[in-house]
Amino acid sequence: MKEKFVKLAHGSGGVEMHELVEKLIISRVEKKRVEGGLGIDFPDDGALIPMGDGRYLVISTDSYTVNPPFFPGGNIGTLAAAGSINDVLMMGGTPLAALDAVVVEEGFPVEDLSTLLGSMIEVFRSENVAVIGGDFKVMPKGAVDKVIINTTVLGVTRTPIIDVPKEGDKIIVSGHVGDHGAVILLLQMGLGERVEELEKGYLKSDVRPLTKLMLPLVDKYAGHIRAARDPTRGGLAGVLNEWARAAGKVVVLDEARVPMRRPVKDYAEMLGVDPLYLASEGAAVLSVDPSVAEEVVDYMKSLGFGDASIVGEVRSSEKYKGYVLLRSTIGGYRILEPPSGDLVPRIC
């Protein structure tokens, strides 16, 4: 690594973060997985541990630092619960239990903290996830910015999703992408009170658990879903680049088919940001066996995800191996680079 100091970009889920984690953690860990499972040698927020009876324990942990902690559509408590639940779901697991660790700044209003933790607990309650333990710390004023929440969710599965697409797979998104990232970007730019869509509630974070989508899908199409991810840091572009590298294939993305709200696209472009890199917290991206792809989309729509769409496919290519090619709305192609820099710091 060339850098001598940690930068915001190292926490944004892009190239810089992957380099730092590989150098400082992954390359130094000898035992990277429990035998027969999935671990840190396959970088993600979660892991699989075989239980010996055909089932796997699914574990995911994540720390949430989103700024601001309250935003249209949710707050850091909602995000911490839904985000870790979704990470377990994307590995094919049924979420069962959660632990949380809260670090709060001295002087933070108790009423606000009560609201945040109440939101987190309500999400776990609504998803029938037991809260079985946790930790609480207070830091001196100025030593931490407002509040940080870590959540660890545990689940079980008999049909884990290993997250490696295959040639010929179709790429499906469950609905609009970029909503959460657009909202946080606008708030961080100080534009919250000037954006009509935010004031009227039309544009808000999409943060939500995806239990009602993923559990039926895994039950019905186990073995046909090759990879699944919620496109948080780095957005859709980040997920597809990771998949292209992991599979050693090229992912071709059709820009015209990506469901995106018009304000998300307009405000992102106005601020010089490609909306394909903006985070979603209530959408799923799937790589699916082409023989059932159309059927999967129809089933997703029947579950209430009416904007689900096939947006691309996985192909073999020596020239573009490990890359994502974007077919633009006017028909040309360009490489969709992996995310880098601190596009929207503290997005989740």
Image (cartoon, helix red, strand yellow):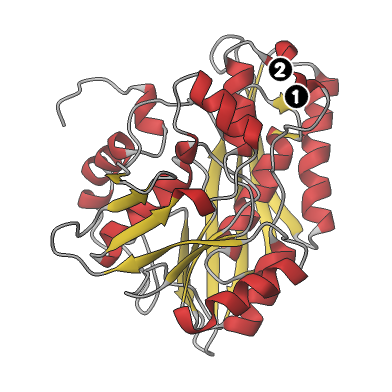
| Residue bearing the label numbered 2 | 195
Residue at screen point 31% across, 23% down: 6
| Residue bearing the label numbered 1 | 198
Pinpoint residue 92: horizontal percent, then vertical percent.
Answer: 56, 72
- On the picture, is 67 further left or further right than 13? right
Dot 1 crowding, Cα within 10 Å, few <14, some 14–19, many 20+ = many
Residue at screen point 34% across, 27% down: 341
Q: Residue furthest bottom?
A: 53
| Total residue callouts | 2
Residue 155, above or below 86: below
Residue 348, above or below 286: above
- Front-most of 3 and 168? 168
- On the picture, is 101 further left or further right than 109? left
Residue at screen point 37% across, 64% down: 39
The image quadrant that residue 167 belongs to is bottom left
* Residue 267 in view in this figure: yes
The amino acid on which the numbered mark 2 sits, given as a three-letter code, is Val
Disc on res. 256: none
Mark 1 secondary-structure assignment: helix
Pinpoint residue 282: horizontal percent, then vertical percent.
Answer: 66, 49
